[in-house]
Amino acid sequence: MTPEEQEYLDRKEKREQEIKDEEDDQATKAAIAIQESFKNEPVGLSEVNTATRLLNKNYSPLIVRKYQLKMWPLFVALICDISLSDLDNVVLDYAYELLEEKQDDIQWCRNFCGSLSEHITDHYDNLKRGCVEGVAVLWYVDKCFISSLGGDFMVHASCKQELFAIINTLPHI
C-alpha cells in the first residue's frame, strides 16, 4: 500500500469516527432534552408513552414568541408538550442560516416561513415523536404579512382565533 493510499484510508477512518461521535452527541442531546421536558411531569397518569398529553393540557399551552428579523417582526407560535427552552436558538440559528440566501422577493419570504415551520416541527418531533400539536410562523415583511400554519392552527378555529388575538395584542403591550 502506498503512503497516499494509507493517508486516504486514515483520513476516511478519521472522518467516519467524527461522524459517529457527532451522532452520539446528537443522541445524548436528545436524551437530555427529553429528560428536561419531563422535569415538571404532573402527578398521576403517566403519559410517557403518548405523543401528546391526554389529561394535563395545562402543561402544554400555546406560546407566541416575537423576534425582530432584519428589522421586521417575526412571530413563532407553538403548541408542544416538551421543554421549549431552546426555542430561541432553534429559530434564530436556522433563520440566520436561511437569510444568507437570496431574500429579495415575496416567494423567497413565503418559502422562508414554510421552511422555518418545518424545521421547528422536525426539531421537536426528533426529541419526542408527535409532540408538536401546532406550529405557526408569521412574518410581516415589507408591507406583506405571510403565515405558515400547521397542525391545530390549520384545523381548529379556536386555536387560530387565540393565536391572532395574541398577535393583535402584542404590539400594544
Image (spheres, grey):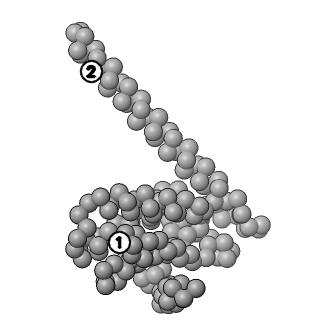
Judged from the image, the secondary structure of the residue bearing numbered disc 1 is helix
Position of residue 138 relative to residue 132, above or below, is below
* Viewer-closest of 30 and 43: 30
Quarter of the rendering containing residue 117: bottom left
Which residue appears farthest toward the front when viewing the image?
71
For disc 2, the neighbor class at 10 Å (few under 14, some 14 to 19, many from 20) is few
Q: How many marks?
A: 2
Q: Residue at x 50, y 39 (%)?
A: 24
Q: Secondary structure at mark 2?
A: helix
Classify 10 Å Cα crowding around label 1: few (below 14), some (14-19), many (20 and above).
many
Q: Can residue 24 be seen? A: yes
Give the answer, above or below, for where 125 lies relative to 65. Answer: above
Percent position (x, y) of residue 145?
34, 83
Residue 129 visible in this rendered orientation of the protein:
no
| Dot label at residue 8 | 2
Query: Looking at the image, which is closer to me, 33 or 68?
Result: 68
Q: Nearer the viewer, mark 2 or mark 1?
A: 1
The residue lying at 32 percent from left, 26 percent from top is 12
Query: Alpha carbon of mark 2 to alpha carbon of mark 1: how far?
Result: 42 Å
Q: Earlier in the sequence, mark 2 or mark 1?
A: 2
Disc sitting over residue 113 in the figure: 1
Image quarter of the N terminus: top left
Q: Quadrant of the C terminus?
A: bottom right
Name the image quarter holding residue 6: top left
Query: Which amino acid is tagged 2?
Result: Tyr
